[in-house]
Structures are given as structure tokens and as C-alpha cells.
């Protein structure tokens, strides 16, 4: 079993770079959008790296070969813990009266965020695979010319 887990982390530098760049960009976009829309934000900007890169990239690598709904389910379990701890410790900050509070009630905010953010795993893995495929095709085309 440990060999199977270890094998999931054996990826090319190019693939890992795509994950890191994509998840960093998405993390910053969501952080700034959440702050702008007064939904939620990280207490410190460096948390984009700790959450999106240090935590979410390895999870994505572990589950990337699963079906999309399995990725969502495993991603939900992982992100629910991350969200719960983040809001509990105050390292993630929810704005009072935000749109999610209005739609689902203030006691369901972390659940709503977890249900939403869990989609990042299948969507992120899909996007990384597409980008990696495009770059690979581009490299093959360059070799042939």
C-alpha cells in the first residue's frame, strides 16, 4: 500500500510545476475574490501557499487517477478538515453577513465552503491534465519541425 501511495507522488517536474502554478493562481484569485465579495479570506496571504500548494497539491496527486466523483468525495473529506481547523483557529476569516450566511445560515458556512471547495480537486486535476497534454503536444510538434 505504501508503494502505491509513493508512486502517486512520482510525477515529472513539469507536471508538478503545472499543479503548483495553477493552484497558486487559483488560491490567490479565490483569496482576493473572497475578500472583495466579503465572503471569507485568509488571515495572511502566505496561507494561499500553505493551503493551496502544501495541502491541496499532494491531495490532488493522491486522488488524480480516481473518477471525478471519487475525487470530489475524498477532496470534500480533506477540505472539510482544513476548513474546520482554519475557521476554528481564526486563520481563515468569514465576513459577518456574507452571501453564504444569507443563503444557508451562519451555522452552515464551513459546510458550504467545504462543499464548494471540494470541486477544486476534480476540476484542478482535469485542468492540470489538459494543460500538461497541451504542453506535451506542443513539445512533440516542436521536435517534428
Image (cartoon, helix red, strand yellow):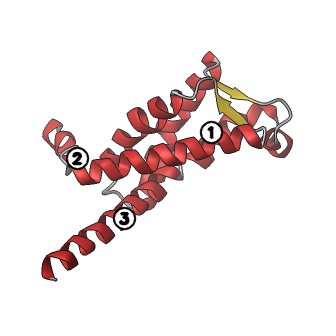
**Residue 57, visible in the rendered structure:** yes
Q: Which residue is mark 1?
A: 31
Residue 15: give x, y in percent of width and height.
27, 53
Res. 6 image quadrant: top left
Query: For numbered disc 3, what is the local secondary structure?
Result: helix
Q: In this rendered view, identify the residue nearer to me: 123 or 25.
A: 25
Q: Which residue is mark 3?
A: 131
Q: Is residue 4 left or right of residue 98?
A: left
Callout 3 crowding tier (Cα within 10 Å): few <14, some 14–19, many ≥20: some
Note whether 101 is above or below 72 in the view shown. Answer: above
What residue is drawn where x is 39% and y is 33%? 54
Q: Is residue 55 left or right of residue 65?
A: right
- Looking at the rendered image, the disc whose residue lies closer to the viewer, 2 or 1, is 1
Residue 20: give x, y in percent of width and height.
38, 44
* Badge 2 or badge 1: first in the primary sequence: 2
Callout 1 crowding tier (Cα within 10 Å): few <14, some 14–19, many ≥20: many
What residue is drawn where x is 46% and y is 33%? 49
What residue is drawn where x is 62% and y is 48%? 116
Note whether 46 is above or below 125 in the view shown. Answer: above
Q: Which residue is mark 2?
A: 8
Note whether 5 is above or below 72 in the view shown. Answer: above
Query: For numbered disc 1, what is the local secondary structure?
Result: helix
Quarter of the image that includes the C terminus = bottom left
Residue 19: give x, y in percent of width and height.
36, 49
Q: Is residue 81 left or right of residue 4?
A: right
- Looking at the rendered image, the disc whose residue lies closer to the viewer, 3 or 2, is 3
Quarter of the image that includes the N terminus = top left
Callout 2 crowding tier (Cα within 10 Å): few <14, some 14–19, many ≥20: some
Q: Is residue 31 left or right of residue 133?
A: right
What residue is drawn where x is 86% and y is 42%? 102
Amino acid at each position: 500500500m505504501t508503494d502505491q501511495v509513493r508512486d502517486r507522488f512520482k510525477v515529472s517536474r513539469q507536471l508538478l510545476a503545472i499543479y503548483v502554478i495553477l493552484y497558486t493562481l487559483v488560491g490567490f484569485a479565490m483569496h482576493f475574490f473572497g475578500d472583495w465579495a466579503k465572503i471569507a479570506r485568509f488571515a495572511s496571504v502566505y496561507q494561499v501557499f500553505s493551503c493551496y500548494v502544501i495541502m491541496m497539491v499532494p491531495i490532488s496527486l493522491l486522488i488524480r487517477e480516481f473518477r471525478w466523483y471519487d475525487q470530489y468525495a475524498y477532496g470534500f473529506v480533506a477540505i472539510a478538515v482544513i476548513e474546520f481547523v482554519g475557521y476554528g483557529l481564526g486563520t481563515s476569516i468569514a465576513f459577518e453577513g456574507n452571501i453564504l450566511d444569507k443563503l444557508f445560515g451562519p451555522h452552515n458556512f464551513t459546510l458550504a465552503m467545504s462543499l464548494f471547495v471540494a470541486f477544486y480537486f476534480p476540476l484542478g486535476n482535469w485542468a492540470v491534465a489538459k494543460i500538461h497534454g497541451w504542453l506535451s503536444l506542443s513539445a512533440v510538434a516542436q521536435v517534428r519541425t
